[in-house]
Image (tube, rainbow, N blue to C red):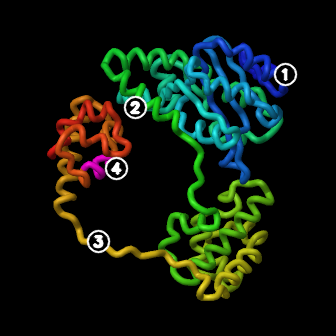
Amino acid sequence: MTDAGAAGDLYLDTQPAVDAFVGGLRDAPLLAVDTEAASFHRYRDRIYLIQLSTRDRTAVIDPVAVPDLAALGALLADPAIETLFHDADYDLRILHRDYGFTARNLFDTRIAAQLLNEPGIGLAALLEKYLGVTLDKKYQRADWSVRPLIPEMLAYAADDTRYLAQLRDILKDQLTAIGRWHWAEEEFQLLEQVRWSVNGPPEEAYLRLKGARTLRGHQLAVLRELFAWREGVAGQLDRAPFRVLMNDAMLSIAKAMPADETALKELKALSPDQLRRRGADLLAAVARGVAAPADSIPVFERGRRMAPDLAYEARLERLKAVRNQAAEALPLAPGVLCANGILEAIARLEPKAVADLAQVEGMRRWQVEVLGKALVGT
């Protein structure tokens, strides 16, 4: 256990230190939480720091050095403790991915700010506006997997939770004052359901790259080979894949299918250093793709283009107009008041009564309260 570089902060990198600190939080009414991962730098991502703050104490846990965090998981799952995050969604997903943790009794200061129609909903903007605190963005893209972490990095990390309790109080008071606290409560309850999920089979990941659908035939086979090569190198180096080869460069090479170093160089997709170190491997991957059997080449399914449903499109435009008018009156960002995806579902459903809106997936009770009558029959 060492000083983290700011008054009152602790850097907890031993099991006894973590057990002692977390054990002392069992009766805390409120706990602010944040995490730091390293997907921007590493191939094998994981949580590398966990920041915790009560109203008067802050600590930074090193989960790389501490094998057992079950006591922290129990705190997050305790409905008697209000758990604060700023932009909880990703933190909740990776806490579930790495430890199986779930959280109850949540408060998300980002969502609260959205419901207050704040022009800036980032933590730095909110802290500067309401508390006069200026966050240093120097370590925003830091590699949190490195050890040892310098005191300035630990202090930066601690600031992400240090002020959340004060900010929570201000935002909750404002939501209550304008009658939107129950909106926030519903949103926070939905956050409790957030879990980590995998987006499709890993062998198909290359087909999900932006721009992959512009490729045809052996170009896709080349992309598959380039993607597999990049994954292998990134895994071996434990480096984020884009740091090995950018997506745009990979797509350019797949589209051109260069046969030699001169053609590869002419694409201007690689730096001179990449060309020198990786050129031969990339050309080998291209050659494998070009030589791939025809029956192994992936094919994007082309759905039949449906005839336009003019009545549906007209209903959707009317719904958007109603939503936009209500958003301006509140005021609230239109997408926060009701996302376009929900309006599309309503346009398809054609509800005849407000009660019918309960069938619309994702629609909140507070949205029905605010918009329900205006949307029905539109």
- Mark 1 → mark 3, Cα distance in angstroms: 63 Å
Q: Earlier in the sequence, mark 4 or mark 2?
A: 2
Residue drawn at 21 percent across, 58 percent down: 313
Residue 139 seen in this snapshot: no
Label ID, residue 25: none
Tell me which amino acid carries mark 1: Pro
Q: Residue at x 25, y 51 (%)?
A: 349
The kind of residue tagged 2 is: Gln
Which mark is first along the chain, 2 or 1? 1
| Magenta span contains residue 345 | yes
From the viewer's perspective, is residue 10 above or below residue 34? above
Percent position of residue 220, x then y? 57, 77
Relative image position of residue 187 (x, y in whole percent): 42, 32
Q: Is residue 16 above or below residue 334?
A: above
Left or right of 265, for residue 308: left
Residue behind mark 4: 341
Give the Cα separation between the discs numbered 3 and 2. Answer: 36 Å
The residue pinned by badge 2 equals 114
**Res 146 quadrant in image:** top right
The segment highlighted magenta reads: 340-346
Q: What SS does tag 1 mark?
A: helix
The answer for how far apart the CA atoms under marks 4 and 2 are is 18 Å
| Kind of residue at badge 3 | Met
